[in-house]
Each structure stands twice: as C-alpha cells, then as structure tokens.
Image (tube, grey):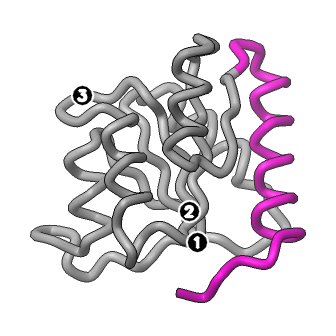
Amino acid sequence: ILLVEDNKADVRLIQEGLKNSSIPHQIMTVRNGMEAMAFLRQEGEFSDAPRPNLILLDLNLPRKDGREVLAEIKADSSLRRIPVIVLTTSSNEEDIFHSYDLNVNCYITKSRSLSQLFEVVKNIEQFWLSTVTLPSE
C-alpha cells in the first residue's frame, strides 16, 4: 500500500488502523505529490521502490496536489491499473466529481472520529486487499 499523506497525525492513525491486520501488507508513505510520482516511477531515492497494489491518496498535498497526482497516475499506461482510493477531509462535491472524472476507484471522506476512521481503514483493507481481485501488473 502506498499512502500519500502529508499530515503526520493521519499517517500514524492510518498505520495504526492497518497494524493489526490479518492480511499481509506493507505500508510505504510519501508526504507530497512529487514524492508520490517519483515513488511510482521508481525515480531517484525511490529507484528500488516496490510497485504498490493500492494507493491511498490525500487530495490536499504540498508540491503537487493530489488531483494532479491522480490525473498523472490514470494517464500513465504503466500505472493506471493500480487502484487509487482518495482518502481526504474534503467533502466538496466538485472534488468528488473531479476525482471520478479522473477515474479514481473510490472516494472516501476522512472522519474526524477515531473509531470511524479505524473502521474505514479496516473496510478498505478487507475489501481492497482481501475481496477484490487486483491486476498483478
């Protein structure tokens, strides 16, 4: 799982929510859109980065906005099949419509409730890592 999130507290909460998983996974975290694209393209310091099976993407990122990252991922034939879940605080209808126009796989508004956030993370894990059949490349 590639977590693209600039808020350190949210990173910790999402990692904590996935910590007790019965499904084997590795979480890699980048803090901005430029790092996300470098990671996905295995550039620079990320030259040995593994290809993620799932991307959790915040929209409001420094350096390169999550909307731009989503557009780049879905326009790249080598990346577009990786499922992208927008996990953001924005419940703005424009953000939701725009994300789906860019072919996001799922849009989830983060809850400020700790228990609800853990439940969302658990559901993401269960559905996307256990139920869904993902492409191998």
Say if 67 sits above or below 97 in the image: below
Asked if the residues shown at circle 2 and circle 1 are in contact, with their CB atoms under 8 angstroms apart, the answer is yes
* Pointer 3 or 1: first along the chain: 1
Magenta-drawn stretch contains 125: yes
What is the number of the mark on residue 1?
A: 2
For badge 1, the amino acid type reads: Asn
Residue located 42% across and 45% down the image: 4
* Residue nearest the viewer, comparing 26 with 56: 56
- Given the current orientation, which residue lies at the most extreme front position? 101
For badge 2, the amino acid type reads: Ile
Residue located 50% across and 71% down the image: 52
Q: Quadrant of residue 41?
A: bottom left
Say if 21 sits above or below 111 in the image: below
Few, some or many residues within 10 Å of mark 3 (<14, 14–19, 20+): few
Q: In whole angstroms, how far apart are the C-alphas of marks 3 and 2?
A: 20 Å
Q: Quadrant of the N terminus?
A: bottom right
Element at label 1: loop
Few, some or many residues within 10 Å of mark 1 (<14, 14–19, 20+): some
* Pointer 3 or 2: first along the chain: 2
Element at label 2: loop
Q: Which percent across, then down, holds residue 8?
A: 42, 30
Element at label 3: loop
Q: In whole angstroms, how far apart are the C-alphas of marks 3 and 1?
A: 24 Å
Residue located 51% across and 29% down the image: 98
Is the stretch drawn in magenta largely helix, strand or loop? helix
Magenta-drawn stretch contains 57: no
- Describe residue 95's horizontal placement relative to residue 66 as left or right: right
The span picked out in magenta is: 111-137
User: Label 3, on which residue?
Assistant: 62
Residue located 80% across and 36% down the image: 120
User: Label 1, on which residue?
Assistant: 53
